[in-house]
Structure formats: C-alpha cells, structure tokens
Image (tube, rainbow, N blue to C red):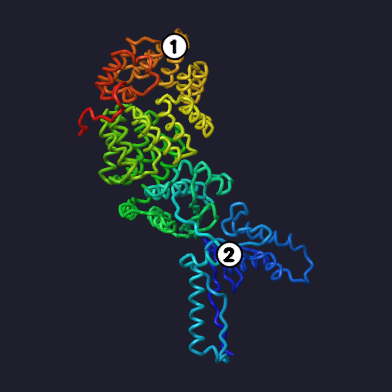
Amino acid sequence: MAPQVQASRVMQFGAFEVDLRTGTLRKSGARIKLQEQPFQVLTMLLDKPGDMITREELRQKLWPADTFVDFDNGLNTAIKKLRDTLGDSADSPRFIETLPKRGYRFIYPVNGARAPAAVQVHSPMSRWQQPWATGLVALTVLLAIAVAANLGGLRDRITGRVGVGPISSVAVLPCKNLTGDPEQEFLADGLTDVLTTHLAQVKSLTVPSVTSSMYFKGEHKKLSEIARELRVQAMVEPSVQRSGKDRLLVNLQLIHVSTDRHLWAKSYEVDPKNVQALLPVAAREILEAMNAQVTSEEKSRLSSSRETTPEAYEAYMRGSYHARKGTDADRAKAHEYFEKAIEKDPNFALAYASLAVLRAHGGFFRAGTGPLDAHTQTREWAKKALELDDTLAEAHTALAWIEMDDWNWMGAEQEFRRAIELNPNLPVARTWYAQFLSCMRRFEESLAQAEIARRLDPVSPDTSLHSAEPYLNAGRVDEAIESYRKALELEPNYHVAHHNLARAYIEKGMYQQAIEELEKAMALGGRNSLSLGVLAHAYGKAGRREEALKLIGELLQRPNREHVPPLRPLAIAYSGLGDKDKAFACLETAYQRRTGALFELNSQPLYTPLRSDPRFQDLARRIGLPQESAPPVAGAPKERSK
C-alpha cells in the first residue's frame, strides 16, 4: 500500500496559528489554552473556510448518538468559549459568523486558498493510470483551484452569492489598541489617521474624516449601524498588538457592510519604528481589493515616500492625537508636539502643514502667540511645507486661509481649489472654502461645499459648526441653528458652538436666548473679546444699552501689545447699539492696520445695521469685496503677495 501524502496542517488567520497535528493554538507565537470541544469546532470550521458547517454536522462529529447530553447548550457553550479565546463577537463577528438555526461559518481568510486536508494515493487502481483519467484529475484540480480562488466570481455563482460590485465609499474604523499599553493609544489613533489620509487622496472614493471615525471609538455598535451613520459601503477594521518583545502586528481587514463579506485581510509584522512605511503599502493593497479607480497621479503620490525619523514621526502622531481632541489645552499640546517633530526632522513637511492648519483659523490665540506674529509664522510654515512637498492638501488649505485674510481673493481661491484637487475628502478644505465663497457672496457654491463637508464628516462637531456658517450668512438661519444644535449634541461643552448659536438667535430676534448662549460660551471658554463684542451687540439689539456700554468699557481696557483695542469686537458691539460712527471708526482703523477679519465684512450678519451706509460700500470696494448690488464674483483686487 502506498504511503499517505499529508497536506499542510498548519492554518493561519490574523495573529492566530493552529497546528492540527499537535492540537495547539497560538497567538502571535504564544500558545493559548483551548478546551477540546471548542478546538474541535475550530478545526471543522477551518477545514471549510467560507462554507457553512451545519449544527447537525457538528452534532454528529462531537456529540454522537450514544452520547447523552444537552446538545444545544453544549454547542452554544463551545462556540462561546471559542469566541472568547479569539476575542470575537457574535454581534460583530470577525472570525465566526452565526447563521441562525442553521450553523456557523468561518469568515476570516485562511492561508489564502484552502488546501485539501489529505490525499490518498493507491497504486492498485490501474484504471486511474489511463491518460483520460489523468486529464480528468487535472481538470478537477484546476476547477477546484478556480472555485477556491473565486476566479471570475465562479464560487459566487455556484454558491448563489452575489458580487459586491464597485465600492465608492469606505471608512477606516478606530484602530484597536491590543498591545496592553495605554501609552500606545496615540499610535493606534495615528494609524487610523494616516491610513484615512492615504485613502482620502483618491478622487473616486468618498472617505469620511478621521474625526467622524473616531467618534465611534469604544462604541459597541454593529458595523451596519456605523456604516449607515457614516454613509459608506465598506469598512477597514485595523488593530495593533504586540508580536514578541520588540515587534508589532498590524492587522487590517476590509469588510463589505451590506453583504458582511470579508473582501481582504492581512497581518503585517513590523518594527514599531517602521509603521509609517507600512501604511502606504497597506493603502495600495486595500484600494486594489476594492477595485477602486486610482489615477496615475494618485498612484504616484501613494508610492512616493514621505518617511521621517522614528522620533519625529512619534511626535507628529502624538500631536495629531491631541489636535483631534479640540480643546484649548489639547491644541496647545498639539502645537508643542508638532514643533518637536520639526525639531527632530527639519524637513518633515507634514508637521509644518499641521502646524499651519492648527493656527491658520484662529488656533494661534490658543497657542499663546499674538495674532500678528501668528499670521506671519503660519504663512511661513505653510510655504515651508509646500517647498518640501507641494502635494500636501493641508498646507494649501492653510495658505488659502492666510491669502484670504490678506484680501488676496484670487490667490486664496487657487489654493483652496488645489487643496481639494489633491484631497477631495479633506473636510477642513471644504468648510474653509465654503466660508470663502460665502464672503464672496457666492452662496449657492458655498452651500454646495458645506454639504460635501457634512457628508464627509457627519459626526464631527467642528464640521457641523463650520458648515453652518454659509447657511447663516445666506439668511437660512433655521438650518444654521439646526447644525449648531447638532454640534452641541455631539459635544455639549463646545464653547464656540454656543457662541455661534447665539449669533443665529440674534438674527431671529431671540435676544434673551442669544444672551444665555453667550454666557454659556464664556463660562466654558473664558471671557474672550469676540464673545464680549457679540454679547454687547445682543444687549444693544435688546434695548439693554447700559449693559452693552459696560461691556464696551471692558473691551476698551483690553489693548494688544501695540496698544490697540480689539477692533472687530468693538465694531460688532457698536453695530448692535446703532452707533455707526464709532463702528466705522473701528472698521477704518482695522482697514489701515489690515486686521480684524475684514474678509467677512460683506457676509457677516452682525454688520447688517451698517450696510445701508455709503461708508460700508466704500470700505467693501477698497477691500475688493463684491458689492451688494453686483452679481457675486470672486475678484482679484491685487496681485498675489510675493
């Protein structure tokens, strides 16, 4: 009798390895104890990955007819113990899927295409030595390989499973930190951030922002629920864990949500210092698995290396971790880490770009630097980032805002458009561009950009806040109020949302509600000058003149380092009181000093009491803003500053 030829009996899936000969289960090389019945269930599932193993098959194998036991309870217990060992969940399965009342299915890829368990070779069977028989065997083997690999969707057609079709939207879920070290939380979050950034560069895909994805961190929701809220077809589920003493295992799987199919999965064992080099590779493999349309330019950007030193990369990841939290203290911490990243690597383009974005839109005052210094410094950081890497959408976005603040309308629009071209899924580029278009009184275009931002970032307080501005400026106040309230539902202590909601209430004539919201804003974020100015405006509109004048007195006692009082808050306060002369005096001084956010002059509702005055139209003309009576256009009042 010829000897038996045994196929490989070592099965790998994710971080796990099963040796069917020795009956052992290992995770990242370390042996894990698993009782006999759960192990037998696992071997049956692994023997036919992707196929259903019926409850009856399991009963016949593990609980023969002469065994007197509560089968249902025994099987349920074995499945539960197996899932507990693998860290799996019945509600959101990664490895073992329950097919109600029928059986179970192993859904994680196992060793690529499944090999047969054993092949018996019997020499006496001379009839199988005939040429036609050999050909039949070869054809059978080829057909088995084609089915196992699902070539041309053959397995799907045989089993009745429908292909998923093209995927146009995907989200990266928060990376699970399975290292056991809370200090590595920044690494897990950073992995989510960077992988999202890589995928978001592809124009054919809609990729929700990392802010929206991180909203679901720690949430025990079904994937289908998260996908519905993020409006995506597919999810990338990452995790990171230890692999030995000095290595990390990064696990990624791509899931098609509506069919619950695992389209792709892979584990990468890397040195912690080399995670940054891994992520572009992983992104390319995910895009290939999704059959995404990727242009040659996008492929080139994904292939180009932006690697930095491990120390600089860690500082950058820590900075991004704090920047996402959004509090004043975290912004200041992010600022420190981004500067540390630059200190470790003076050619780290992304760190310069991140600093520029952090400070371009008002973040500078939180970092403790004066506005004039910040304006110059932010421009330098954005330009430095672009010198090092002109494909960074974040740097173009920051520079666009600075150009807008400098009244360089053409330059600002060029930078916004370039940012969106490079990364159409960057919410901050969309919301800031929407605000720019609103200032240009191009309200329809502005609202379109705001809607795209909302779609990209549906559960982000920041995006809900900033995308509401165009609605408020366009006179669609109820819709603005709805967005501000949503921001507060997501983050009740978001003081800027309370501030902006108050501005919307002023437009509705709801002055008492506006005053209450401003008091909440200042209780949470401090008595900043802008909130005092808006509160004085609300008091003035409500006929509470003495209270408004008292706040103006407080503002006049707040000169900056050049002994100039806060001009923008004072102009807003005087506007609410109807004191046009003093309001225009503040605006004229702001014009001469090129400060005070005058780019918002034509769109800011708080300036409405001044609009009928000829001085208002004259100031708007000198700044280069479109006139009220003229069709909204994006002008170019001066050459771009060199």
Reply above or below: 392 against 603.
Answer: below
Q: Are marks 2 and 1 in contact (CB under 8 Å)?
A: no
| Few, some or many residues within 10 Å of mark 1 (<14, 14–19, 20+) | many
Is residue 152 or residue 481 the one in the foreground?
Answer: 152
Is residue 336 or residue 77 the one in the foreground?
Answer: 77
User: Mark 1 is on which residue type?
Assistant: Gly
Is residue 110 or residue 11 the one in the foreground?
Answer: 110
User: Mark 2 is on which residue type?
Assistant: Arg
Image side of residue 260 versus residue 433, left or right: right
Please name which of the two marks, 2 or 1, marks the residue nearer to the observer: 1
Disc 2 secondary structure class: strand
Q: Which quadrant would the N terminus be assigned to in this image?
A: bottom right
Numbered marks: total: 2
Residue under circle 1?
540
Q: Whole-Å distance between the Cαs marked 2 and 1?
A: 73 Å
Residue under circle 2?
31
Residue under the image location 45 percent in, 15 percent down: 538
Reply above or below: 133 against 210.
Answer: below
Query: Residue 345's spot in the image, x, y percent?
Result: 31, 46
Query: Residue 332's spot in the image, x, y percent?
Result: 41, 34
Reply above or below: 520 against 93.
Answer: above
Q: Which quadrant would the C terminus be assigned to in this image?
A: top left
2 or 1: tag closer to the N-terminus: 2
Image side of residue 65 versus residue 388, left or right: right
| Few, some or many residues within 10 Å of mark 2 (<14, 14–19, 20+) | few
Where, by quadrant of the figure, is residue 595 drawn?
top left
Q: Which mark is residue 271?
A: none
Residue under the image location 49 percent in, 87 percent down: 132
Reply above or below: 208 against 29.
Answer: above
Disc 1 secondary structure class: helix
Where, by quadrant of the figure, is residue 337 drawn?
top left
Query: Residue 615's spot in the image, x, y percent?
Result: 28, 14
